[in-house]
Image (cartoon, rainbow, N blue to C red):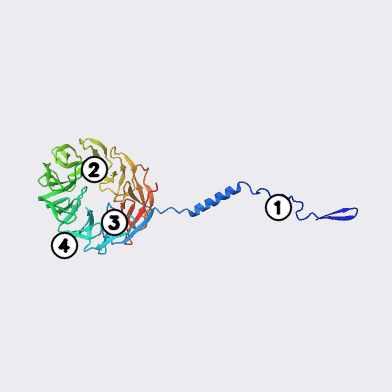
Amino acid sequence: MAAETFGGNTVVIDLGLDRGEPDEYASPARSTVPRWFAPVLIAVVVLLGSAASAAPPPPALTPVLSVRVGPADPYAMTTTGDLLVQSLGTLASYDLADGQLRWQTGSDAPSYRLRTGSGVVLLRPYAGMARTDPGTTALSLANGSALWRRSGSVVTVAGSPALLAVSSVRSFSGPGRRVQGSVEAVNAATGMTRWHVAVPSTAVLLGVPGTGDLAPRMLLVHDNRTAAVHDFTTGAVLATGQLPPADYGPDNPVVSGGLLLLRHPTLAGRMVSAFDPVTLQHRWTRPAGSAFGVVTCGRFACLTGPDGVRAVDPADGGLVWSRPAWRSVEERDGMVVAFGTPAGDSDPVGIVDPASGDVLVDLRGWRLVPGSGGDHLLVTRIVHAGARTMVAVAAPGDAGPELLSDLPAGTGDCQAAPGRLVCRSTAGELVVWAYQRKG
């Protein structure tokens, strides 16, 4: 409302409630909101919604299973994904994939170790100072049922499904390597003897891996230096031959690079001689230097000792490469790892190329986790004066170990399986974790 004065008279003019605003102000024909506002609002809503709904990344180590065990209770992992644990008077099998119990059965006495082969679990109680033979019991790996029991020790042979009953001579290189009395092939289903080979005195027992169409074979090197190759199916002698005088033992001779390699003394010094493992024909002889071991490294054979590591060609014994600073090498899952100490594990140099001796992945400062990771290695590293233990993955092609996580406090004595890490804890548990590479 407005007031005007005309000739002394006051005239009142009513402007109405709209105060003269155009009609379209009350009902605009188009939006008064800026064009950019709606797209921006939608983008913000979508972004907030996706952030709220996205799951956090899974932990690097995911617990799969935890089992109560004693500090000396044995356990073993199989190539078929089983975890076998002997504890508190029982033997149990768990699925490493999901931690589910597959079977459980009573166990009469604790075993020093658990061995598997040809679908059976072999249990041999620790004899200690006892004069009686504890024998060997076989259980079905599928369901834990008892299959058979027989006296003596029954061992497996690397690279072969055979089970052999032997009377072992004590050594530090594993059971069954030096034997006496006789060697008997055991039927895995019944425990009955299929064939036997007499050993007049003692002999070194070796498994010869199969190559091409040739099946695995058994090699016995007797005390009189006579070597005999036997068929695993029938026990028949396939070849015999005389070997040079040597310090025969569980680690001499060895099968490496597809050949039987023997370290032996001569008037000209210590030598390494190669023999065909099928025919026992002599192939070549070369100086051994100070080598105390011969191991397989790729398609070559590596001589290891205080004067370094030397790779030789199995075709003619020619030197391929040498690394004076190394002391040993080890082949794991097709990868060759070099070490700065003879014992290995504690002082790895790195994953190396067996063809050239070049370091592919530097592992200095790390320790190898025993077991098989598949196409990679698991390694650990203690930092901050033992306050933390890191676990990482290493494989050819990596710039260095890929850190996974810290191990929980009080965890150690670990073993690797594909996608799994199994460790003992100071709380008296055996813990299985699942892990996955970040890449």
Q: CA distance from mark 1 to mark 4?
A: 106 Å
Q: Are marks 3 and 4 in contact (CB under 8 Å)?
A: no
| 427 versus 159 height, above or below | below
Q: Residue 262: percent from the left, percent from the top?
A: 17, 42
- Number of residues whose C-alpha sits closer than 10 Å to that of mark 1, classed few (under 14), some (14–19) or many (20 or more): few
Q: CA distance from mark 1 to mark 3?
A: 79 Å
Q: Are marks 1 and 2 in contact (CB under 8 Å)?
A: no
Q: Which residue is the site of mark 1? A: 26
Circle number at residue 83: 3
Q: Are marks 3 and 2 in contact (CB under 8 Å)?
A: no
Q: Residue 185: percent from the left, percent from the top?
A: 15, 52
Taking depth in this image into account, of 161 and 256 the one nearest to the observer is 161
Among the 4 quarters of the image, the one containing residue 297: top left
Q: Secondary structure at mark 2?
A: strand
Circle number at residue 81: none
Q: Nearer the viewer, mark 1 or mark 4?
A: 1
Taking depth in this image into account, of 435 and 11 the one nearest to the observer is 11
Q: Look at the image and tell me whether residue 305 can be seen.
A: no
Q: Nearer the viewer, mark 1 or mark 3?
A: 1
Q: Nearer the viewer, mark 1 or mark 2?
A: 1
Q: Is residue 89 left or right of residue 391?
A: left
Q: Look at the image and tell me whether residue 102 can be seen.
A: yes
Q: CA distance from mark 4 to mark 2?
A: 38 Å
Which amino acid type is marked by label 4? Ala
Identity of the residue drawn at 28% across and 55% down: 82
| First in residue order: circle 1 vs circle 3 | 1
Which amino acid type is marked by label 1? Ala
| First in residue order: circle 4 vs circle 2 | 4
